[in-house]
Image (cartoon, rainbow, N blue to C red):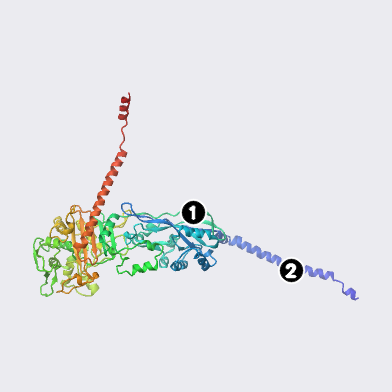
C-alpha cells in the first residue's frame, strides 16, 4: 500500500505544468506588448526627437569665424591686419580631468598663472558644447612639435590656426585705430541671441577707437560647417559648409607720413595734434602723446604691462586729441575778433592804449596782459599779431557774453564735432545759462573778460580747435571731421548761419598771416624762410592760478604746473588745404613750442600732396598712352620701301 502511495500523480503534474505554462505565456505576452509599445514610442511617436539626438552624437555644427576687415591709410599703408597664429585650445567635454591635462601640458609647454586664470574664466563664459577654449596664443614651431609628439597623452587638446589682429605701426595710431581684445563676461552678457550667434568662433571684439566704432563693419558674417566626429569627438569629415563673409576694409583719410612727422616733432612731450583737410573735414593726422603698443591688448595684456600703463603719470592710454579738455587761450582770438566785426562792435582800425592791464569801470581789480609793460597803442590787426590780452578784454566786454556765446557755438565750441570715434568730449563754451545750471551763480562782467582770452571756464579739445580753424580757413563753411573715407556716413555739413563779409574774412586772414610773417608777429621766428604763406595764432593756457600782483616765474613752478602751449594754423593762405591744432602740455610758449610742430605737420602734408599729384599725373599719362591707338601702317610702308 505504501509503495502505491509513493507513485507519481501524472495527471496532477500535467495540470500544474499547464497552469505554469499559461502563466509564463501571459507574462511573456505582456512583456512583448510593453516592448512593442516602447519600440512604437521610440520609432514612431518620438522618432524625430531621438533621430536628432542621435545625430548630435556624431554630427556637430561648428562656426567658421569671418576674417576681420583690414584698415589702410589714404596711401594704402596697412594700419591693422590679420596675422596667422597657432593657438593652444582645450575642449572641456573631451577631457576626463582638466587638472591632469594642464599638468601634462605644463611639462613641455610654458604658460603663466595669468594664462590659466584667463582660461578658467573663459570656461565659465557662455559657450557652445564641444567649443574649444584658448589656453595660450602664438605657439612656436617647437611647441607645436612637442604637442604633436605627445598627442596620445592629450585627449581634448587642440592646436588651431587662427588669424590674430596685428598693428604694424604699433604706437603711431593706438588712440585712433584702437585695438581689439578678448570678449569679456560683461560684453558677452550684453549680447542678444543674434549677436551671440554672430560672434560664434570669434574671441575678440573692438575695444576702442575705429575698431570699436566700426565693429559691425569690420567683423563680417559668421559661417558654419556640419562635421562628423568619432566617439572621442575628433572630426572625421565635413558634411556641409556655409563659408563666412569677411569684414569690409576701412580706408582712412590719415596720412602716415604726416602722422609720423607730427609725433616726431612733439619729441616725446605730452600733447596732441589734430590736422584736418579743409575741403572735406578728413582727419589727416591725430596724435596723442605719449602712446602705447596696442598689440599688447590683442590676446590679453599681462598684469605687469597693464599696471605700467594705468599707473603712469603721463596717462598713455588717454586720447588727448578728443578727450583732453584745455583752456584754448589766445587761439580763439581770431574768431572773437571776427564776431566783433560781424556785430559791428568796433572799428578794427581804431587803436586803444595797452598799459599792461585792463580795468572795469568802478573796479580795482586789474586784468593783466601777458606782457607786463603792455603793447602801447594797438588796433585789431596788431592785437591778433602780437596777442594783446588788453585789447581782447575790452573787445569781449563791448561784445557781451550772449553774442560771444552765439558766435563761438556756430564754430563748434562747447559741442561735439560728430567725428566717427567713440568717447569724444565736448568741452565748455560758457554762457549765462551754463554758469547758472552748473555753478548756481549769476554771470559777472569779469567772466566775459576771461572768455575773451580763452580762459576762465572755457575748455576745448584739440579736435574742436582744429575744426574751428578749418571753419576759419573755409570762410565760415563748417565741415564735420571724419576719419573713414570709403563709408557712407551720416555727415552734417552746413554753412555758418552768420553772413560775414569777404572783407572781414580777409582782414582776419591777413592778421593771422602776420603772426607768422611779420617781424612783430608772435611766431615770426617759426614763419621765416617758409616756401608758402601760412596763417596762425599762438596761445598759452594757465594750469594754476597766479595772484593778481604776482609774476609768472617758470623756474619756481614744477614742470606739470607750467602753462600749456597751443597753436592753430592753416595753409596755404590763398587756398587753404590743411588746418592744424597743437597743444604741448606745460610747454609754456605757444609760438616757441607748439608753432614748430604745426609748421612741420603742414610742410609734410604739402610735400606729400606734391608727390601724390605727380603720381596721379604720371598715371594719367600712362593710361592715356595705353588707350591711344598705335598707327603702324606708316611704319610698315616705310620699312617696305627701305627693304625694297
Residue under the point 17% across and 69% down: 450
Q: Where does label 2 land, which residue?
A: 23
Query: With 82 as the anchor, is 453 left or right in this view?
Result: left
Q: Secondary structure at mark 1?
A: strand
Q: Earlier in the sequence, mark 1 or mark 2?
A: 2
Quarter of the picture holding the N terminus: bottom right
User: x, y percentage for residue 538?
Assistant: 18, 62
Query: With 44 as the anchor, is 468 left or right in this view?
Result: left
Q: Where does label 1 land, which residue?
A: 241
Nearer the camera: disc 1 or disc 2: 1
Quarter of the picture holding the C terminus: top left
Residue under the point 73% across and 67% down: 24
Q: Secondary structure at mark 2?
A: helix
Dividing the picture into quarters, in which one does residue 45 lie? bottom right
Dividing the picture into quarters, in which one does residue 409 lie? bottom left
Residue under the point 38% across and 63% down: 297
Crowding at label 2, few (<14), some or many (≥20) Cα neighbours within 10 Å? few
User: x, y percentage for residue 211?
Assistant: 36, 60
Residue pushed farthest top? 644
Q: Is residue 3 above or below residue 72?
A: below
User: x, y percentage for residue 357?
Assistant: 12, 70
Amino acid at each position: 500500500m505504501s509503495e502505491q502511495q509513493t507513485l507519481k500523480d501524472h495527471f496532477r503534474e500535467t495540470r500544474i505544468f499547464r497552469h505554469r505554462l499559461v502563466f509564463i505565456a501571459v507574462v511573456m505576452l505582456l512583456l512583448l506588448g510593453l516592448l512593442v509599445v516602447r519600440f512604437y514610442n521610440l520609432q514612431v511617436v518620438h522618432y524625430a526627437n531621438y533621430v536628432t539626438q542621435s545625430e548630435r552624437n556624431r554630427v556637430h555644427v561648428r562656426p567658421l569665424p569671418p576674417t576681420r576687415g583690414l584698415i589702410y591709410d589714404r596711401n594704402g599703408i596697412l594700419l591693422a591686419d590679420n596675422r596667422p597664429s597657432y593657438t593652444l585650445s582645450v575642449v572641456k567635454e573631451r577631457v576626463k580631468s582638466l587638472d591632469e591635462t594642464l599638468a601634462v601640458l605644463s611639462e613641455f609647454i610654458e604658460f603663466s598663472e595669468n594664462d590659466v586664470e584667463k582660461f578658467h574664466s573663459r570656461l565659465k563664459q557662455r559657450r557652445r558644447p564641444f567649443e574649444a577654449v584658448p589656453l595660450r596664443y602664438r605657439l612656436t614651431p617647437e611647441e607645436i612639435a612637442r604637442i604633436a609628439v605627445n598627442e596620445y597623452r592629450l585627449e581634448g587638446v587642440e592646436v588651431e590656426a587662427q588669424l590674430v589682429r596685428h598693428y604694424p605701426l604699433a604706437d603711431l595710431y593706438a588712440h585712433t585705430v584702437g585695438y581689439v581684445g578678448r570678449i569679456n563676461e560683461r560684453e558677452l552678457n550684453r549680447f542678444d541671441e543674434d549677436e551671440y550667434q554672430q560672434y560664434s568662433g570669434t574671441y575678440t571684439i573692438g575695444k576702442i577707437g575705429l575698431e570699436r566704432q566700426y565693429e559691425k563693419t569690420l567683423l563680417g558674417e559668421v559661417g558654419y560647417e556640419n562635421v562628423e566626429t568619432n566617439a572621442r569627438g575628433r572630426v572625421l569629415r565635413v558634411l556641409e559648409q556655409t563659408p563666412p563673409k569677411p569684414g569690409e576694409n576701412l580706408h582712412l583719410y590719415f596720412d602716415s607720413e604726416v602722422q609720423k612727422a607730427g609725433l616726431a616733432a612733439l619729441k616725446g612731450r605730452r600733447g596732441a595734434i589734430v590736422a584736418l583737410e579743409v575741403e572735406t573735414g578728413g582727419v589727416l593726422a591725430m596724435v596723442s602723446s605719449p602712446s602705447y603698443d596696442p598689440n599688447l591688448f590683442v590676446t590679453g595684456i599681462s598684469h605687469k604691462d597693464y599696471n605700467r600703463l594705468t599707473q603712469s603719470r603721463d596717462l598713455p592710454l588717454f586720447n588727448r586729441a578728443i578727450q583732453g579738455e584745455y583752456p584754448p587761450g589766445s587761439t580763439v582770438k581770431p574768431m572773437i575778433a571776427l564776431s566783433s566785426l560781424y556785430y559791428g562792435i568796433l572799428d578794427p582800425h581804431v587803436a586803444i592804449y595797452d598799459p599792461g592791464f585792463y580795468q572795469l569801470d568802478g573796479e580795482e581789480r586789474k586784468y593783466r596782459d601777458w606782457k607786463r609793460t603792455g603793447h602801447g597803442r594797438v588796433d585789431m590787426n596788431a592785437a591778433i599779431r602780437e596777442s594783446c590780452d588788453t585789447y581782447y578784454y575790452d573787445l569781449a566786454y563791448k561784445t557781451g557774453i550772449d553774442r560771444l556765446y552765439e558766435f563761438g557755438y556756430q564754430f563748434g565750441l562747447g559741442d561735439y564735432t560728430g567725428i566717427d570715434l567713440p568717447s569724444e568730449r565736448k568741452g565748455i563754451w560758457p554762457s549765462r545759462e551754463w554758469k547758472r545750471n552748473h555753478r548756481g551763480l549769476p554771470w559777472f562782467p569779469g567772466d566775459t573778460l576771461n572768455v575773451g582770452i580763452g580762459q576762465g571756464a572755457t575748455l576745448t579739445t584739440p579736435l574742436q580747435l582744429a575744426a574751428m580753424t578749418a571753419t576759419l580757413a573755409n570762410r565760415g563753411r563748417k565741415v564735420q571731421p571724419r576719419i573713414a573715407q570709403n563709408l557712407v556716413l551720416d555727415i552734417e555739413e552746413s554753412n555758418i548761419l552768420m553772413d560775414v563779409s569777404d572783407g572781414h574774412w580777409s582782414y582776419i586772414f591777413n592778421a593771422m598771416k602776420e603772426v607768422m610773417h611779420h617781424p612783430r608777429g608772435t611766431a615770426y621766428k617759426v614763419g621765416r624762410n617758409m616756401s608758402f604763406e601760412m596763417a596762425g595764432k599762438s596761445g598759452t593756457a594757465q594750469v594754476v592760478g597766479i595772484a593778481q600782483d604776482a609774476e609768472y616765474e617758470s623756474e619756481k613752478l614744477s614742470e606739470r604746473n607750467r602753462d600749456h602751449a597751443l597753436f592753430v594754423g592753416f595753409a596755404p593762405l590763398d587756398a587753404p588745404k590743411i588746418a592744424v591744432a597743437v597743444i604741448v602740455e606745460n610747454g609754456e610758449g605757444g609760438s616757441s613750442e607748439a608753432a614748430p610742430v604745426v609748421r612741420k605737420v603742414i610742410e609734410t602734408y604739402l610735400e606729400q600732396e606734391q608727390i601724390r599729384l605727380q603720381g596721379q599725373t604720371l598715371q594719367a599719362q600712362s593710361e592715356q598712352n595705353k588707350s591711344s591707338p598705335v598707327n603702324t601702317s606708316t611704319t610698315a610702308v616705310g620699312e617696305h620701301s627701305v627693304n625694297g
